[in-house]
């Protein structure tokens, strides 16, 4: 089985207030005992920021958001590790798709063609 692990998290700024924020986070997630990682994007948002956001938009899709009272990256990392424990699968593709239910995978909705599929499409267009 492929075991996903959180290798790093990246934020680009700290919240100005501890209870009103929406911070973009990038998580580098890869395979246990292996080099490399794919990136998964999400936001850490406070309830106050959700209320403000809902003034502008009427519906806020919850995928890709972790909701916390106060910004604490250690707590966020622990939550991601809990998610990853539930995403162990036979292949990396299945792992990444399972994680993608919670966070936004950099390769979401990218479909690669086999050589045969590409050749068939090229021949069809000619």
Image (tube, grey):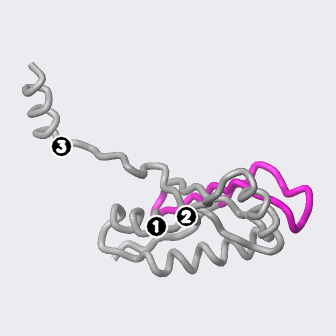
**Residue 16 placement, left or right of 7:** right
* Kind of element beneath mark 3: loop
Crowding at mark 2 (Cα within 10 Å: few <14, some 14-19, many 20+): few
Q: Residue at x 34, y 61 (%)?
A: 93
Q: Residue at x 61, y 59 (%)?
A: 59
| Earlier residue among tags 3 and 2 | 2
Residue 19 placement: quadrant: bottom right
**In the rendering, at what x and y percent does residue 9 appear?**
66, 60
* Residue under pointer 2: 63
**In the rendering, at what x and y percent does residue 108 appear?**
42, 52
The quadrant of the image that shows the N terminus is bottom left
Give the answer, above or below, for where 82 lies relative to 54: below
| Earlier residue among tags 2 and 1 | 2
Is the Cβ of the residue at disc 2 closer than 8 Å to that at disc 1?
Answer: yes
The answer to whether residue 108 of the structure is visible from this angle is: yes
Q: Nearer the viewer, mark 3 or mark 1?
A: 1
Q: Which residues are magenta?
A: 9-35
* Residue under pointer 3: 114
Confirm whether the magenta stretch covers residue 69: no
Residue at the extreme right of the image, as rendered: 17
């Amino acid at each position: 089985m492929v075991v996903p692990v959180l290798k790093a998290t990246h934020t680009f700024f700290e919240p100005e207030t501890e209870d009103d924020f929406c911070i973009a986070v990038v998580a580098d997630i890869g395979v246990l005992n292996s080099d490399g990682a794919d990136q998964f994007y999400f936001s850490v948002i406070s309830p106050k920021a959700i209320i403000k956001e809902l003034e502008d938009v009427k519906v806020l899709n919850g995928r890709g958001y972790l909701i916390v009272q106060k910004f604490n990256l250690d707590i966020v990392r622990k939550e991601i590790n809990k998610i990853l424990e539930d995403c162990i699968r036979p292949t990396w593709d299945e792992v990444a798709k399972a994680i993608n239910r919670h966070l936004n995978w950099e390769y979401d909705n990218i479909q690669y063609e086999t050589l045969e599929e590409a050749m068939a499409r090229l021949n069809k267009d000619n």
